[in-house]
Image (cartoon, helix red, strand yellow):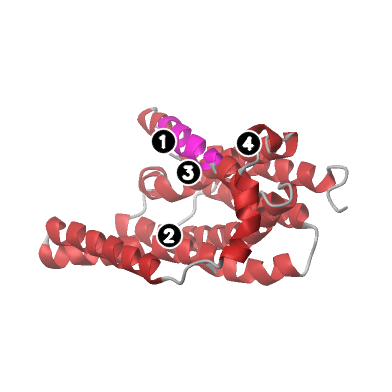
C-alpha cells in the first residue's frame, strides 16, 4: 500500500498541478504543492506514537555498525536499485520528450502515454502485493517482470508505432514494473540481518540516488545527440541487467533457508 501510494501520487501530480497552473497561474500551482506538504506534516504529527516495547528491536539494530550490514548481498542489491532507478528514469523522466521527438506523436498523446505508465505502475503494485505473499520466488518474479518490460521497451524503441499502441505498451510496461515492486522489497528484507531491515533499506536505497544522478546526464546526452529512441534502448539494457541481478539473488546459496 505504501508503494502504491507513491506511484499513485506520481500519476495524479502532473494533471493536478497543471490544472492549478491553468486555473490560477504557476504561483497557484506552487502554493498548492506547498499546502500539500503542510497537510502531510500534519498527518505525520497526528500519527500515534510507536510503542516503546515494539521499538526496542529497532533501537538495538541502530547500534549495529554499518560494516555489519554491508554484506555482498546488500552491496549487490544496491547495484540492483541503481539499475532499476536508471530504467525508471528513462521511462518516467524522458519518455515524453523521446516519444514526441522519436515517434512524432503529439505532446498530448505523449503525456497520455506517461500517465498510462504511472497509473499502470500503481495498479501493478496492488497486483504484485498478493503475488509476493503467495510465493518465495521473489527474484524470479522480479526477473520476469523486468524481462517482459524490456521487450515492450524494445518494441517502443524499434517499431514505427502510432499513439494508441505506444500508450498501450507504456501502460503495460508500467503495470509489469509495478508488479515487481513488492517482490523487490522482499528481496531486500530477506537480505537484511535480523533487526536491521531499516538500515539495509537505507543503504540499498542510495542506489536510487545514484541512478537519479547518472540517468539524466546519460539520457540528456542521448537527446542532444539526436537519438531519442535510444532513451528506450537504454531502458532495455538497464531492465535486462536488473533482471539478471534478480535471478542471481534468487539463486544465491542460502536464499531460501
Residue at 74% across, 34% down: 72
Ranked by sequence position, the earlier of labels 1 and 4 is 4
Residue 199 image position (x, y, % from top left)? 60, 45
Q: Residue at x 22, y 67 (%)?
A: 19
Q: Nearer the viewer, mark 1 or mark 2?
A: 1
Vertical arrangement, residue 171 with respect to residue 103, above or below:
below
Q: Residue at x 47, y 43 (%)?
A: 90
Label 4, on which residue? 79
Crowd rating for badge 2 (residues with CA inside 10 Å; few <14, some 14–19, many 20+): many
The quarter of the picture where residue 83 lies is top right
Residue 47 appears in the rendering: yes
Q: Give the distance between the C-alpha atoms of the residues marked 1 and 2, in whole angstroms.
A: 20 Å
The answer to which of 126 and 115 lies nearer the viewer is 126
Q: Quadrant of the N terminus?
A: bottom right
Distance CA(mark 1)–CA(mark 4): 18 Å
Say whether disc 3 or disc 1 marks the residue closer to the N-terminus: 3
Q: Main secondary structure of the magenta part?
A: helix
116 relative to 58, above or below: below
Mark drawn on residue 90: 3
Give the mark toward the camera: 3 or 4: 4
Badge 1 marks a residue whose secondary structure is helix
77 relative to 6, above or below: above
Q: Give the residue at mark 2.
A: 113
The span shown in magenta is 206-219
Crowding at dot 4, Cα within 10 Å, few <14 / some 14-19 / many 20+, comes out as many
In this rendering, the label closer to the viewer, 3 or 2: 3
**Residue 53 image offset from top left, x and y in percent:** 62, 65
Q: Is residue 217 magenta?
A: yes
Q: CA distance from mark 3 to mark 4?
A: 17 Å
In the picture, measured across the screen, residue 76 lies left or right of residue 222, that is right
What's the residue at 77%, 54% (across, down)? 140
- Give the side of residue 152 with respect to residue 168, left or right: right
Amino acid at each position: 500500500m505504501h508503494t502504491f501510494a507513491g506511484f499513485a501520487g506520481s500519476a495524479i501530480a502532473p494533471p493536478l498541478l497543471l490544472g492549478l497552473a491553468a486555473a490560477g497561474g504557476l504561483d497557484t500551482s506552487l502554493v498548492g504543492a506547498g499546502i500539500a506538504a503542510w497537510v502531510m506534516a500534519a498527518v505525520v504529527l497526528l500519527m500515534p506514537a510507536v510503542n516503546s516495547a515494539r521499538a526496542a528491536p529497532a533501537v538495538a539494530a541502530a547500534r549495529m555498525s554499518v560494516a555489519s550490514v554491508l554484506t555482498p548481498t546488500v552491496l549487490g542489491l544496491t547495484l540492483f536499485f541503481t539499475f532499476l532507478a536508471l530504467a525508471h528514469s528513462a521511462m518516467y523522466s524522458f519518455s515524453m520528450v523521446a516519444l514526441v521527438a522519436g515517434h512524432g506523436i503529439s505532446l498530448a498523446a505523449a503525456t497520455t502515454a506517461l500517465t498510462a505508465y504511472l497509473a499502470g505502475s500503481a495498479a501493478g503494485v496492488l497486483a504484485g502485493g498478493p503475488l509476493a505473499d503467495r510465493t518465495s520466488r521473489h527474484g524470479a518474479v522480479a526477473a520476469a517482470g523486468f524481462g517482459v518490460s524490456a521487450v515492450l521497451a524494445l518494441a517502443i524503441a524499434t517499431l514505427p508505432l502510432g499513439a494508441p499502441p505506444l500508450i498501450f505498451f507504456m501502460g503495460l510496461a508500467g503495470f509489469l514494473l509495478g508488479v515487481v515492486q513488492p517482490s523487490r522489497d522482499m528481496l531486500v528484507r530477506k537480505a537484511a540481518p535480523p533487526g536491521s531491515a531499516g538500515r539495509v533499506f537505507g543503504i540499498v536505497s542510495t542506489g536510487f540516488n545514484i541512478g537519479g544522478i547518472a540517468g539524466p546526464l546519460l539520457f540528456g546526452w542521448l537527446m542532444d545527440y539526436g537519438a531519442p529512441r535510444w532513451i528506450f534502448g537504454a531502458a532495455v539494457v538497464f531492465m535486462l541487467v536488473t533482471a539478471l541481478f534478480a535471478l542471481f539473488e534468487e539463486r544465491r546459496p542460502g536464499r531460501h533457508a
